[in-house]
Image (cartoon, helix red, strand yellow):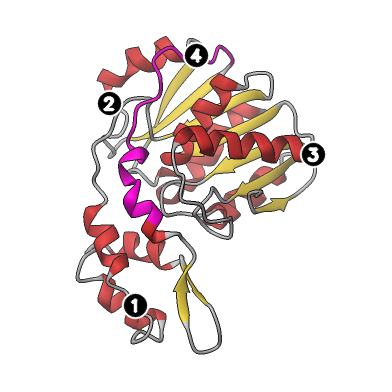
Amino acid sequence: MELHSNIIGEGDPLIILHGFLGMGDNWKTLAKQFSGLGFQVHLVDQRNHGRSFHNSEFNYEVLAEDLKVYCSSRNLEDIVLLGHSMGGKTAMLFAALYPETVSKLIVADISPRFYPVHHDAILEGLSSLDFEVIKSRKEAEIQLSKYVHEVGTRQFLLKNIYRVSSEVLGLRINLETLKTHVSEVGESLPSTLKFQKETLFLRGDKSEYISTQDEPLIKHQFPSAAIKTISNAGHWLHAENPVEFFDSVCAFIT
């Protein structure tokens, strides 16, 4: 079982890992910009997301191992690894376990600590989508709006809908497994793990995912880390302020 990816450009490898309920294609616009810097960008779908395989096992250990298999099968070395939210935790764990494979690490709006479950309404809304009745994205959005009131979040979630056939819609994510294991998404990384190489943590100035209280933990586990704040951005900082996000990553990786 190997992860699906969309590969853009030629050059040194840069792997991007999406967050919970996302997919690699969420990053396509930025990936094209990174490819212009001389990188081969791998937009990877993590298991149970996007076009990657479905599996009942779901935790950061298997997500990191999936990425190791992906890199080994393509002989990818000295990668720049960028992860957002859940993808950031996968990236942190992978870098700590396989530091010889990672040249630089970028973590977007997540720290190594524990986070309580806070996706209940979203998962309930996705579970309410009955595709025997719902035949269009608009109908799906109307149903989802009963549970998810923020328009941007709804649009992000609706990207998971695809046409199983000309008449039937479905979800790409493995919803039942993700509901069962949603607590795994917030799990802390082992405090004994460290990554000594250059690391950049990016946080949104309107987000609470990385606070000043998190900085000592980040510095302990990532001694070479810099922490930078992206202005006018919340948790989806790469989408809310893509220019400043790109410039910050660009300065770090070039």
What is the quadrant of residue 232 in the picture?
top left
Give the Cα distance between marks 4 and 2. 20 Å
Which amino acid is tagged 1? Ala
What is the quadrant of residue 108 in the picture?
top left
Which amino acid is tagged 4? Lys
Tell us which disc is closer to us: 4 or 2: 4
Q: Residue at the location (33% across, 83% down)?
A: 139
Q: Residue 11 carries which label?
A: 3
Please check the rendered image and state whether residue 201 is part of the magenta-colored stretch, yes or no: no
Highlighted magenta segment, given as a residue range: 177-197
Residue 194 in the figure: left or right of residue 236: right
Return the residue at label 2: 211
Q: Main secondary structure of the magenta part?
A: loop
Give the Cα distance between marks 3 and 4. 28 Å
Tell us which disc is closer to us: 2 or 1: 1
Tell us which disc is closer to us: 3 or 4: 4
What is the quadrant of residue 154 in the picture?
bottom left
Question: Residue 10 or 37: which is nearer the viewer?
Answer: 10
Q: Residue at the location (65% across, 49% down)?
A: 1
Mark 2 in CB contact with mark 1 (< 8 angstroms): no
Element carrying mark 3: loop
Q: Residue 194 carries which label?
A: 4
